[in-house]
Amino acid sequence: MNELPKGLEEFLTDAGWGGAAIDPIPGDASFRRYFRIRRDDGSTPARAMLMYAPPPEEDPQPFLEVGAWLNDNGFRAPQIYHEKPAQGWVLTEDFGDDRMREWIEANPSGEIGAYKTAVDVLSTLSRTDPGPFAPYDMDVYLREVGLLVEWYCPAMNLSVDDNGFYAAWTEALTPLIDAKNPGVTVLRDYHAENIMMLSPEKDGEAAGTGAQGLIDFQDALVGHPAYDLVSLLQDARREVSTQLERDMLDFYRGQCGLSGEAGDQFEADYARLGAQRNAKIVGIFTRLYKRDGKPRYLDLIPRVWEAMERDLAHPGMAPVARWFDANIPPELRKAHGGKVA
C-alpha cells in the first residue's frame, strides 16, 4: 500500500497539479486511500486532498452528489477541484489537520463549544428538506444489526436465535419508522473524527455551521434525525461522558423545540437508534478483525458495548434487551465489554 496508485500523477497533471508533492495519509476502515497534495509554485490553493476510491470496491459518485447537496444547502463540505469518478479519483479542498477529536484534546476548554456547533449542524439539518437520497428503512436497519449475529456471535462461539433476533428488532424499531416521515438527511458517520475544525470555537458557545467541515458523508440516506446525534454522542472512537451526552441531547431538544410528549418520543427513538448503531458497530469491528486483519478496532468494542447497555435499558428496547439476555449473557457482555477474544 506504500506504492502510489497507477494513474495518480496523470490525474494530477490533468487537474493542473502536475509536479506537486504527494503525501499519503493513513487510511480508515474502507478501501479508500487519501493523499495530501502540495504545490510550491505560487498557485492557489497551494494544498488539496486527493481521494482514491477505486471501483468496484468503492464509488466516489455518492460523495460528489452528497457533498454538492450539502454545500447547496449551506453546510460545509469540501469544494471539488477535479474529478474522474469512473476511475475513482477526486481532488478536493483541504480542510487541514484539525479534526474535532484532536482539536479538543489540545483545547479541552473548547469541548462544549465544539459539540454545540456539531449539534447545531444537526438541528439545522433537521429543519432542511431531505436530500434526494435513498430511505433509511427497516430493511437497512435489519441488514446492519445483522452484522452482529453474522460476525460477533460466531467469533464468540455463541449459538443464538437468529429469527428471534430479527423479530425483536422489528418490534422495537417499528415505532421509529412510523415517526420519522418525511425524514432528514442522515450522514451516518457523524463523529469527532469526521468533523474538521475550520475556525476557533468560543468556550461553551456554538460557532455556527460553517465553522466545522464535514467529511465521510458518502453513505447519506433519508432517515431519523436522532441517528447522527447518536453517532456524535455515543462515539465509538472518542470517550464522551454521560454528562456531556445528556447536556448535548438537551441542547438539541431545545434547538428543535422538542418538549413534552415529542421530547419523550425523540429520546425513545434516540435509544432505539443508539442500540441499532452500536450493534452494527460491534459487528463491523469484529469483521474488520476476523476478515480484514485489523485488530486495532477490537480495543474500541468495550466502549460500544457500554453505550449499547444504556440504550437497551430504555423501555422501548425491551424486546431486544430480552433477546440479548437470553442469547448473549450479561456476564459475558460486562466481563470485558463484549470484546472479541
Image (cartoon, grey):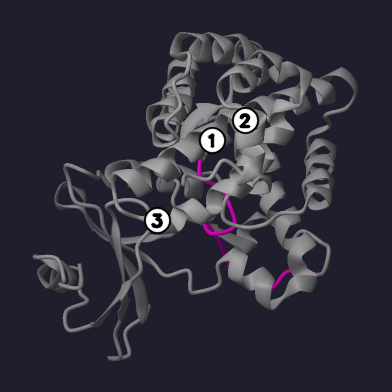
Q: Which one is earlier in the sequence, the residue at label 2 or at label 1?
A: 1
Quadrant of the image containing the N terminus: bottom left
Magenta span dominant secondary structure: loop
Q: Does the magenta stretch include residue 27?
A: no
How far apart, in angstroms, are the residues tagged by discs 3 and 2? 23 Å
Q: Mark 3 points at which residue?
A: 295
State the SS at label 2: helix
Q: Could you tell whether 113 is left or right of 80 in the image? A: right
Q: In the rendering, at what x and y percent does residue 131 appear?
A: 48, 32
Label 2: which residue? 275
x%, y% of residue 40?
30, 91
Range of residues picked out in magenta: 188-202
Lower sequence index among marks 3 and 2: 2
Q: Badge 1 local density, few (<14 within 10 Å), some, or many (20+)?
A: many
Say which residue label 1 marks. 186
Q: Which three-letter amino acid code belongs to the residue tagged 2? A: Ala
Q: Name the residue located 60 percent from the left edge and 61 percent from the top edge.
A: 212
Left or right position of 171 against 55:
right
Of circles 3 and 2, which is in front?
3
Q: Earlier in the sequence, mark 1 or mark 3?
A: 1
Q: Residue furthest bottom?
A: 41
Q: Position of residue 25 (x, y in %)?
A: 34, 71
